[in-house]
Image (cartoon, coloured by chain):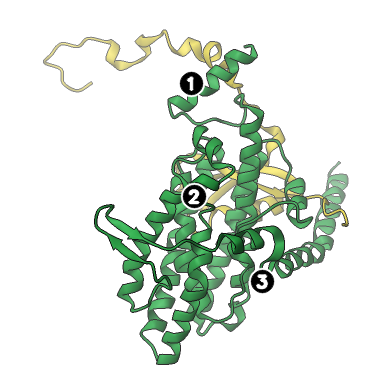
Chain colours: A green, B yellow
Amino acid sequence: MDATALAANFENKLAKNENIEPKDWMPDNYRKHLIRQISQHAHSEVVGMLPEGNWITRAPSLRRKMVLLAKVQDEGGHGLYLYSAAETLGISREELLHQLLSGKAKYSSIFNYPTLSWADMGAIGWLVDGAAIMNQVMLQRTSYGPYARAMVRICKEESFHQRQGYEIMSVLAAGSPEQKAMAQDALNRFWWPTLMMFGPSDANSANSENAIKWKIKRESNDQLRQRFVNQTIPQAELIGLTIPDAQLKWNEAKQGYDFGEPDWEEFNQVIHGNGPCNKERLGARLKAHDDGKWVREAAAAYASKRKLVAA
Amino acid sequence: MENTKDSQGLVWEVFVQKKPGQPYVHCGNVHAHDAEMALQNARDVYTRRNEGNALWVLPSSEIVASSPEDLGSFFEPANDKIYRHPTFYQLPESISHM
């Protein structure tokens, strides 16, 4: 087939809502867009292990500790599913990791905020995973097959993440005044960064237009943000916590909440490396990579030695 | 910046069997330096929630796949032989199960 026919074939598949698969022809920019988006998503899962890993040894009970360990292990697994999906586009795991470790690749800005108290584990599970799920449910219908299939797995596994977070928050909110204050403080600190997770407003989002055109994204940043707010407000009210937004108000006409604008200047600062924990997070990843170097070398040496013995 | 691109091992495709007697279904892949490590990684990555009790792993490079361009001609022989389907045949009305 010539280039025009291939392009028409690609457009035709999108129009029929058929998945694009690794060996199918695709425009270079579609491939590039996916590599960037999927690898950022993978890096976010992996870096996302750090703020929560920070609390594993200090979880308040064995139950909480087991749950947190399982959750953090899941995030690592999700990173692997996503790296696999990105690799089907013709980029190696080595290159993807190099992009993260050299600071070239981005990951979700939310993980550059510190986790100061145990209640932050609740806020992350409830809000951060809740926002991530909102996005990932949509991505189960993304046009690129391997990405969509990874999302189906991830969504299935994520459902406990949000519940365990909300459970932590509701237990603290029903506890002593100090515990309730701790939960409220965590909500105060994580609310706005969570709303920023959906990305800039549609009008200012550099990548949104292509993502919608290629059916990589099926809904806009603002639509997802609105749905998240609508879903979360009653959950906060139910456990007696207050959303830190003076402009928050039910809007009968749109059957949804009006809410304030996140501080996009802060968002830009964090994205560009100036958040509270950017250096710490990358430093921890680099250290883990360096500390694991001898393991990779030993595994490679062992494999080649066994091959020699077998030959 | 030091080079962080040391080896992540080979890619191995992973197939999982949900229950004895059922077919092995492809579920994804892992990186590993040898078969034993591939099996262990596959267990950790793909069976954390009782997804199965048996696994196959094999190097991705060993998989031979048809290409999308073949879609028409390669599978064409299956299209024009409707007599391979039971619905092709007419039975007397009195026979309801066959």
From the viewer's perspective, tell me whether residue B8 is left or right of residue A155.
right
> At label 1, which amino acid type do we have?
Asn
* Subunit ID for the residue under disc 2: A
Relative to the observer, which residue lies in front, A116 or B20?
Answer: A116
Q: Measured from the top left, where is residue B89 in percent x and y?
A: 26, 10
Q: Quadrant of residue A211?
A: top right
Q: Which mark is residue A136?
A: none
Nearer-the-camera pick, A91 or A301 = A91
Q: Is residue A181 above or below residue A200?
A: below
Residue A137 point in image, percent of width and height: 44, 49
Could you tell whether A280 is left or right of A300 in the image?
left
Q: Residue at x 59, y 83 (%)?
A: A58
Q: Can you identify the residue that label 3 sits on?
A: A276
Question: Residue B57 occupies which quadrant of the picture?
Answer: top right
> Mark 2 — residue?
A153
Does mark 1 fall on the same chain as mark 2? yes
User: Residue sitting at 66 percent across and 29 percent down?
Assistant: A28
What number is the disc on residue A12?
A: 1
Relative placement, left or right, of B38 versus B47 is right
Q: Amino acid at mark 2?
A: Arg
Secondary structure of residue under mark 1: helix
Q: Position of residue A104 (x, y in %)?
A: 75, 52
User: Is residue A205 placed above or below B61 in the rendered structure?
Assistant: below
